[in-house]
Amino acid sequence: MFSALRTALVNERSLSSIQSNILAGLTVGVIALPLSMALAIASGVPPQHGLYTAIVAGIVIALTGGSKVNISGPTAAFVVVLLPIVQQYGIGGLLVSGFLAGIILVLLGLARLGRLIEIVPYPVTVGFTAGIGVVIATFQIKDFLGLNIQSLDGHYIDKLWLILQSVPSINWQETMIGSLSLGVLILWPRLQSRIPGHLVALLIGSVAAWLISQITSDFSVATIGSRFHYELNGITGSGIPPFLPGFEWPWNLPDAEGNSIGFSFSLLNTLLASAITIAILGSLESLLCAVVADGMSGKKHNPNDELIGQGIGNMVASLFGGIPATAAIARTAANVRAGGTSPLASVVHGLFILVAILSLSPVLAYIPMASMAALLLMVAWNMSEAKHFIRTLKIAPRDDILTLVTCFLLTVLFDMTIAVGVGMGLAAMLFIHRSIRLTENTKVESGRMNELELPSQISIYDINGPLFFGSAQKALKNITAITPEVRVIVLDMTEVTMVDMSAIVAMESIVANLAAKNVGLVISNLQPRIILKLRRAGVRTRPGRIRFARTMDEAIEKAKRMT
């Protein structure tokens, strides 16, 4: 734990480094402020919960994690997972799921599985992200066009059909504001300005909404202030509450019906699947972000410490009203480009958002929901990686295309819990299938080998690749099918890198089969640790029947003496 902080305290103590990280933190804070609100709204909760996440999780994860430059907070990857939880279990169920996910992330880090998570195949990742992008974009059409829809419930097809049916209720004012904001988001990067484009888009959208309200009396544009309300000491306010997040056990918060969700093992059992999905997505997103950040900054992260930090951050954030968080690639990249080199930048980013809550809440209430929808449409487009999705469809092998399309469709049509489970299963099956192809069993023709005469009573088989439950039977199945004149089998296992229990059982079967035929066996060039495994399993040297050899020359000589 704390590896990034320890390294930074040793190497990043100069005044120039501190100044650089403070400026980077302020830059990222400006970017994260509207994004955190927008992602919270997309997840089905009031915008302040996204800000609480950026503050608490952003600071805690930076101080306890394994990456010096990662910026953590709410991300678009979680939207598809969190929205169904909120709709079914309310904010209380969401925060309990985040707390459980934090525990799982800590356990993954303690089990040192950080490197293992990095091997998820590219088609699985692209399928997830493209599917999430499509779902997020679809859900923003309602606010972007100002459609008269009370709530979007049901499965994706049901929601899409409801949106299509509601198109006649389009609000021209909100559509104009959303289109203006989206146009700024698309065109602003061409100016190569250091001012974040989404900040300009929201400002222009807010000004446009104010101008429309001055021009026409028929003003009906939804804003953060008109959509969300809060209550403090019996006083009701609009928009974002201008006070610090308070400590509250997640199970004391309301469920979807407004009642306290309560603490019970049945609740934990119900939310466990969602928590596992959040933990898997969070680990993938954070470690992928750390790898990208390493390439940009030239630094190295500790993946296991990063998982532990992500877990602690999610646990603590859920106690202060924060939704699940992970490292955000866009914000991390902005941090690196702005000169961030230590966790100080993320701490400053969190403190900036905290100050913004206390001082800018009345101003933030005027942001139009159509502008927030435009921002999320841009986030969805960037996340979908359409170019990579199409390129994979064009050039990838058939197995990869099947995996990509399956993960994409499951994410869009069902939910991320199912998509993650099936996607990880497909990844494992794809890995096993391709590993099996690498393991081969080749019979060496009789004649001369290593300058030694090879009599017909000796058969040599060259085994290549790992022997595990998927490949052992394939590699060893032909060895016992021998002609009557063969008296000794030699197995050249120079390129066998591992042997699991299935392979050991297969080897025991071969030994017993050959012994019944009075045929000897010589195992050559097997690594000492694997020989030890076989001997522990009972595959031991027996007089006249089984031998181990360190080289092929030695193996052939022993085989000749056994004929």
Image (tube, grey):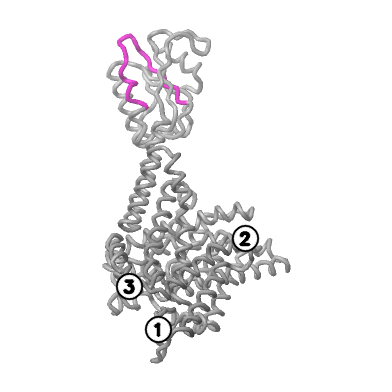
- Point 44% across, 56% down: residue: 108
Residue count near mark 3 (Cα–Cα under 10 Å), binned few <14, some 14–19, many ≥20: few
For the record, the magenta segment spans 475-493
Q: Is residue 305 visible?
A: yes
| Quadrant in the picture for residue 154 | bottom left
- Dot placed on the residue nearer the N-terminal end, 3 or 1: 3
Coordinates of residue 549 in the picture (x, y in percent)? 47, 22
Give the residue type that dot 3 points to.
Answer: Ser
* 360 left or right of 100 in image: right
- Which residue in the protein does label 1 denote? 218
**Circle 3 — which element?**
helix
Q: Position of residue 248 (x, y in %)?
A: 41, 79
Q: Disc 3 designates what residue?
A: 169
Could you tell me residue 531's position as x and y percent?
44, 30
298 is within the stretch colored magenta: no
Spatial CA distance of label 1 from label 2 is: 46 Å
In this view, the residue farthest toward the bottom is 234
Is 365 above or below relative to 386? below
- Badge 2 amino acid: Val
